[in-house]
Amino acid sequence: MRSFLVVAIVLTAVCSMADADPVRVTGGLIEGGTDGEARVYRGIPFAAPPVDELRWQPPQPVIAWDGVKQTTEFCADCAQLSYPEGSFYSRPARPTSEDCLALNVWTEAKSGDKRPVMVWIHGGALTRGSGAISTYNGAALAKKGVVLVTVNYRLGPFGYLAHPELTTESPRGASGNYGVLDQVAALEWVQENIATFGGNPDRVTIFGESAGSWSVCALVATPLSKGLFHGAIGQSGGIFGHTPDLKQERFGEKSAEQVGVEFAEALGADALSEMRARSADQVIETFATTGRGFRTRGTVDGWVFPEEIRTLYAKGLQMDVPVIVGSNANEMSSLTPRAALPKSADAYRTQVEAQYGALSDEFFKVYPVTDDASAVRAALASGRDQVFSWQMRSWARATATVSSDAYLYYFTRVPPIPDSEYYGAFHAAEIAYAFANLHLSDRPYTEMDHRLSEQVSSYWTNFAATGNPNGRDGAGNELVLWAPYSEVEEAYIELGATVQGGQKLLKKENDFIGRTVEARYGAP
């Protein structure tokens, strides 16, 4: 018996060594490291560095390297704005660079396995963020049976600047949307290489939160994504309002090209060559000091987005893939500076009347304002519904134009953080639960939190494996049944202290927000 154990240990060691051997990907051989029981490969290039003449160009093929590339360290974050001092989302600074188009892979699979793949697209308003953030560590999800990938993509003006000279230069007659094209290139890399890590290229799910969810929504819409993924999860972010046009002013918004011309003027550049000659720091500084005149959003350019994103969904032209979509109960608590909250009921009523005009009376029926405290509640709730809950319901409803199912959720668990009574289930609170990464935090999570994390992460990984979140958790327990969304029943699942099904989530609120959007932009 003892000799058998020795042989088993030796064989296990040999297999582990074999799994750690260099692997070949597009560009050459790479060698990674370990993260618990997972093998992890950090900073794998999926495109050429978008610098010099490649700034504001679609991503170009990886530049091959000689020998074995060590992929044990994350690459630099993409050039970006830093969070304001005191921001709820501040984190330790990391190096930034335009040379940032890389991805990271966690896997416990062997080459030849066909495990489902999950590709995470980070948030940060398309202006900040990174695939290297510790909350996105993929070891726990790899342990649950998926191959986990996180990606970087160009941000802010590097990722979304349109300009007439860029449009003229493009053989497609398009500009902007470089961040979206980076994401597409990363998914093409996954199709070409993920089998090497034991992943199944025919079972890829994309998921993201906030701007990452905007990105998922956009990737489901663009025709460039065809065949690159088979399921999508959007956490707190959809694009069912207006998408700016490359050349035309619409709904009182300047064209993307005009915004780009004004950005170039602020940069002090009279020509594209001068724009490319400016340092990354100069571009970021100009972005920081010109306010929000430059929009970090996708653009209707006739190529990446032939029409508005909401129109593509309305016509059933999006990818026909199942989706999980949802939002959190207190999204705006961490996104709204306390100084920006209503100072009084009277002041807030005046603000609402200016914003909603003829719809103001209806607003106050849906979000009653009777005193100063209720004004704060109304401001936070209406912001939540306008920016998040209505968007996610719209996405679930838009899936009716294709054959695949949508599953709607509402995250209500209040994590144990300072001032939790105010923050509630804040924006991004669900991420650590979905990644099964509560153990990486020093927050005093309870047994109930860990149970909820097991449930949420199991819904996510079940969905990645089958396109349906239902089934069992990692301990073999049957999960609460999650019914698909339909416009009749409007089913959803609440992910909170109790996991339970419900119907008609925030119906009167979302119906009202929908009327305000249609009044401004018309039907898609």
Image (cartoon, rainbow, N blue to C red):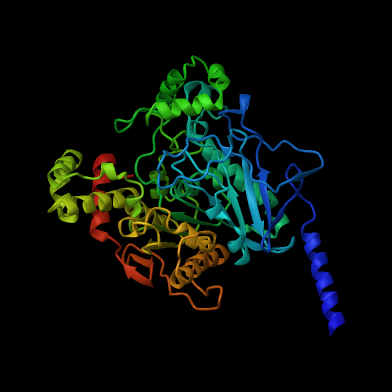
Q: Residue at x 51, y 74 (%)?
A: 471
Numbered marks: total:
0
Left or right: residue 408 compared with residue 189: left
Answer whether residue 281 is visible to the viewer in this image.
Answer: yes
The residue sitting at the right extreme is 3
In this rendering, the answer to whether 117 lies above or below 268 is below
Residue 329, given in percent of the width and then of the height, sits at 33, 59
Q: Nearer the viewer, residue 467 or 452?
A: 452
Residue 511, given in percent of the width and then of the height, sits at 25, 55
Looking at the rendered image, the quarter that the N terminus falls into is bottom right
Q: Residue at x 58, y 30 (%)?
A: 57
Q: Nearer the viewer, residue 396 or 82?
A: 82
Answer whether residue 322 is visible to the viewer in this image.
Answer: no
Q: Residue at x 36, y 59 (%)?
A: 425
Residue 216, given in percent of the width and then of the height, sits at 48, 49
The residue sitting at the top extreme is 270
Q: Residue at x 19, y 44 (%)?
A: 343
Can you tell which quarter of the image residue 428 is in? bottom left
Left or right: residue 494 compared with residue 144: left
Left or right: residue 39 compared with residue 371: right
Looking at the rendered image, the quarter that the C terminus falls into is top left
Residue 93, given in percent of the width and then of the height, sits at 53, 41
Q: Nearer the viewer, residue 283 or 393?
A: 283
In this rendering, the answer to whether 468 lies above or below 291 is below
